[in-house]
Structure formats: C-alpha cells, structure tokens
Amino acid sequence: QDKLIQLQNDRFLYNWRRMQPEENYPRYKTIIKAFKTNLKLYRDFLNEEGLGAVKPEACELTYINHILSIFLIKLSLCLSFAMQTTFN
C-alpha cells in the first residue's frame, strides 16, 4: 500500500510513500483531501463508539524531498571547494 494511517494516543498521521520508482507524488491537493476524508472517518468512528472527540493540540505538514545522491555529492564538492577558496 502506498497510503498509511498511523494512530497514536496524541496523533493522527496520514502518509503517502513511494512504493515503485515510477510512481509520481500525488500532489498536495490529493493528499490533503485524503487526509481530511480519513480524519472524518476516524472522528465519526470515535463518536459512534462513544470514545470521545479528537481535540488537536497541534498540526504539522511534512514534505520530504529525496534528493538524488549524485546531486548531493556534487553539492558537497561545490561547497567544499567554495570553503577552501574562501578560507585559504
């Protein structure tokens, strides 16, 4: 599955993860819609079961952009060269 919901005592997390190299990131609009839909399902479940309401204390949106390792190597070399020429 490329979608994952994690429930903890103080968190409701919705994740998308690339499972195949050819998969494209579904973009923010798709992710936030799925997050809201699943959060509503969770809230409805808690309400129906008499388990109380979700009371968010904080919200966080994290986007991790995996940069190709060859780019990082080139960036590292450029920074190393720039520091050597600046401080020598």
Image: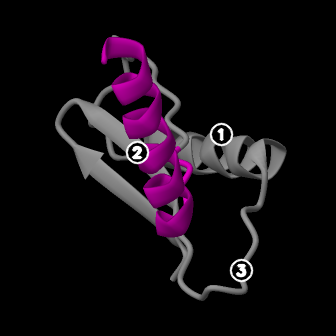
Mark seen at residue 48: none
Residues shaded magenta:
64-88
Disc 1 and disc 2: Cα gap in Å? 11 Å
Which residue bears the numbered disc 1? 36
SS assignment at label 1: helix
The answer to whether residue 3 is seen in the rendering is: yes
Which residue bears the numbered disc 2? 13
Q: Quadrant of the C terminus?
A: top left
Label 2: few (<14), some (14–19) or many (≥20) C-alpha neighbours in 10 Å: some
Amino acid at circle 1: Lys
User: Residue 10: image x %, image y %?
Assistant: 22, 30
Q: Earlier in the sequence, mark 3 or mark 2?
A: 2
Dots 1, 2 in contact, CB < 8 A: no
Amino acid at circle 2: Leu
Identify which residue is drawn at 72% across, 86% down. 22
| Magenta residue check for 78 | yes
Which is more toward the observer, 17 or 86?
86
Q: Does 85 sit above or below residue 78? A: above
Q: Is residue 6 left or right of residue 79?
A: left
Q: Earlier in the sequence, mark 1 or mark 2?
A: 2
Dots 1, 3 in contact, CB < 8 A: no
SS assignment at label 3: loop
Q: Is residue 88 left or right of residue 66?
A: left
Disc 3 and disc 2: Cα gap in Å? 21 Å
Q: Main secondary structure of the magenta part?
A: helix
Identify which residue is drawn at 56% across, 58% down. 71
Which is more toward the observer, 83 or 74?
83
Disc 1 and disc 3: Cα gap in Å? 23 Å
Amino acid at circle 3: Glu
Which residue bears the numbered disc 3? 23
Q: Does 20 sit above or below residue 62? A: below
User: Residue 87: image x %, image y %?
Assistant: 32, 14
